[in-house]
Image: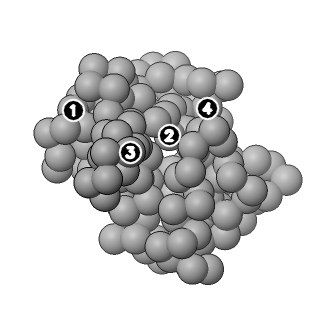
């Protein structure tokens, strides 16, 4: 696993144990998806709006993924996607009710239940390859 930048590690450390563990699992899935597909390339891990964020800066293949936890939703963590994309719509169409989606912005994941890794990896790929797939859809290839 890639080493966590100090500022990002500080944010992870501020979360309750159950949320931190779940978010680190999701972080690992993000890096696994990126390393499994050379079109995604190396990720940039940084903070956006004070939360861990993952960008495809080098290849421009995808849209930013951000991870978060809110005290007012202590049993879930969130994976945020760019609300100007169709990523949440794709997730809803593909997984019909499997994920708790919030508007066109986020997927809420239970912090303590088993993690649907295969399905969640597909969601992550939707984002990390969003721009590549958007061009292919426009060209009628998808």
**x and y, in percent, of residue 93 in the image:** 54, 72
Tell me whether circle 3 and circle 4 mark residues in contact (CB < 8 Å): no
Mark 1 or 3, nearer chain start: 1
Mark 3 and mark 4: Cα distance apart in space: 32 Å
Residue shown at 66%/69% (left/top)? Answer: 100
Task: Note whether residue 15 is visible.
Answer: no
- Mark nearer the viewer, 1 or 3: 3
Mark 1 and mark 2: Cα distance apart in space: 15 Å
Mark 3 or 4, nearer chain start: 4
Q: Name the residue under label 1.
A: 41
Q: Is mark 4 on a helix, strand or loop?
A: strand
Tell me whether circle 1 and circle 4 mark residues in contact (CB < 8 Å): no
- Mark nearer the viewer, 1 or 4: 1
Mark 1 and mark 4: Cα distance apart in space: 22 Å
The quadrant of the picture occupied by the N terminus is top left
- Image vertical order of residue 60 relative to residue 70, above or below: above
Tell me whether circle 4 and circle 2 mark residues in contact (CB < 8 Å): no
Q: Mark 2 points at which residue?
A: 65
Q: Mark 3 points at which residue?
A: 138
**Name of the residue lying farthest toward the bottom:** 97
- Image vertical order of residue 43 relative to residue 71, above or below: above
Q: Which of these two is toward me, 1 or 39?
A: 39
Q: What element carries label 1?
A: loop
Identify the mark at residue 51; answer none if there is no mark: 4
Q: How many labels does the image show?
A: 4
- Image vertical order of residue 29 relative to residue 45, above or below: below
Q: Residue 10 falls in which quadrant of the image?
A: top right
**x and y, in percent, of residue 134 in the image:** 40, 44
Mark 4 or 2, nearer chain start: 4
- Mark nearer the viewer, 3 or 4: 3
């Amino acid at each position: 696993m890639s080493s966590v930048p100090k500022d990002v590690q500080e944010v992870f450390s501020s979360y309750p144990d159950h949320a931190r563990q779940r978010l680190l699992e999701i972080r690992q899935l993000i890096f696994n998806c990126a390393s499994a597909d050379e079109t995604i390339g190396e990720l940039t891990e940084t903070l956006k709006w004070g939360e861990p964020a993952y960008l495809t800066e080098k290849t421009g293949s995808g849209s930013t993924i951000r991870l978060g936890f809110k005290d007012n939703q202590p049993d879930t963590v969130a994976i945020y996607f760019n609300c100007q994309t169709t990523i949440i719509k794709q997730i809803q169409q593909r997984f019909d009710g499997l994920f708790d989606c919030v508007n066109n912005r986020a997927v809420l994941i239970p912090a303590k239940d088993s993690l649907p890794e295969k399905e969640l990896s597909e969601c992550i790929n939707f984002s990390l390859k969003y721009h590549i797939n958007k061009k292919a859809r426009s060209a009628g290839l998808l």
